[in-house]
Image: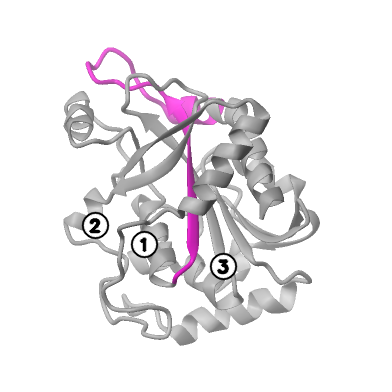
Amino acid sequence: MSEWITLEQIDKTRDIVAEKIHTQPKIGLILGSGLGDLADKVENADVIPYDQLPLWPLPTIQGHKGRLVVGKLENQPILVMQGRAHYYEGPSMGQITFPIRVMQRLGIEILIITNAAGAINPDYVPGDVMMLTDHINLVGMTGLNPLRGPNLDVMGERFPDMSQPYDRELQQKCRDAAQAAGIQLREGVYTWLSGPSFESPADLRFLRAGGADAVGMSTVPEVIVARHGKTRVLGLSGISNKANLDGSNMTTHAEVLEAGKVLVPRLTALITGVLRSL
C-alpha cells in the first residue's frame, strides 16, 4: 500500500459507514484511553467495529474497544470513536488521521477529541480535566506531519493556518458547561510525543520550560488534519498521572486506566453540556 491516503480510499470507507448508519452525524467524538464508556450513552446507536472498515487503524491497547458508535447524544447527531490507534502502534500518519478524513467526507463539522495525558504543570493532579488552548507538535517539528505528501486539494489548502487550532466559541461553551456542573476546568498547552515509552524527568523539565502543561501520545495529528479540512475542534485532556519532574514516582498504563474512572463522569458532564449548547 502507498504511504499516501487517496480521496478514493477515504470515500470507499465513507460509503461503507454511510450504508450502515441511520443518523447523519454532524459531530465527531474521539474517546481516549479509559474514556470509552461515554459511548454507551449514545441513543439509537448503530455500532460498527473498526475491522469492518477498510484502512481504519485498529487499536491494540487496553482501554480502546475499537468501534464506531453513531446515533444521538443530547439530541445531537454524533459519531463516536470508541478508542483510537496511536502512531506508536505502527500505522502511518495517514492511517492515524484517516478517520478524520472519513468524518469530513461524511459531513461532520465539529470534532471533540479527548485523551488521557500526563501532567507537566505541577499544579495538576490526576482526575483534573484540561481544555486544550494550544499544542506543541514536537513530533511534527521533526518531519512527521500528517499533511506530508500530496495535498488533498478538495479537503483543504497546502499550507493551513494553525494560529487557532482549538475553536474559541467551543472553548467558551466548555467553560460554561464546567461552571454549570461545578467542575474545575484547567486550561493549557498539550504536547504530543510519539511514545510508547513514558517521558524521563529530563524530558518533562524540557517540555515544561517550553510552555507545556500536559503530555500525551495522540490528538495533535488528528487536530491538524481536522483544521486542514476546516473542521472546528474542542480538545480535552483527562489528567491521569502527576508530573514526574524529579524521577520520584513511576508511571503505568494501569494508572492511566484507573484515572479514567474518575474522569469519565467529569468529561461526560462537560461534553454533554457543550452538546446541549450547540
Amino acid type, label 3? Glu
Left or right of residue 75: residue 241: left
Disc 1 element: helix
Real-space Cα separation, disc 2 to disc 1, in angstroms: 10 Å
Mark 2 lies on residue: 140
Residue 152, image x, y percentages: 37, 82
Residue 238 numbered mark, or none: none
**Sequence-earlier tag: 3 or 1:** 3
Mark 3 lies on residue: 109
Amino acid type, label 2? Gly
Towards the viewer: 184 or 52: 184
How crowded pointer 3 is (Cα within 10 Å; few <14, some 14-19, many 20+) is rated as: some
Disc 3 element: loop
Q: Check if residue 248 falls in the magenta segment.
A: yes
**Sequence-earlier tag: 2 or 1:** 2
Towards the viewer: 165 or 104: 165
Height in image: 95 above or below 45?
below
* Quarter of the N terminus within the rendering: bottom left
Left or right of residue 40: residue 271: left
Q: Is residue 57 visible?
A: no
Q: Which residues are magenta?
A: 230-258
Mark 1 lies on residue: 224
Q: Mark 2 touching mark 1, by CB under 8 A?
A: yes
Indicate how the structure is coloured in the image: one colour
Query: Residue drawn 56% across and 83% down?
Result: 12
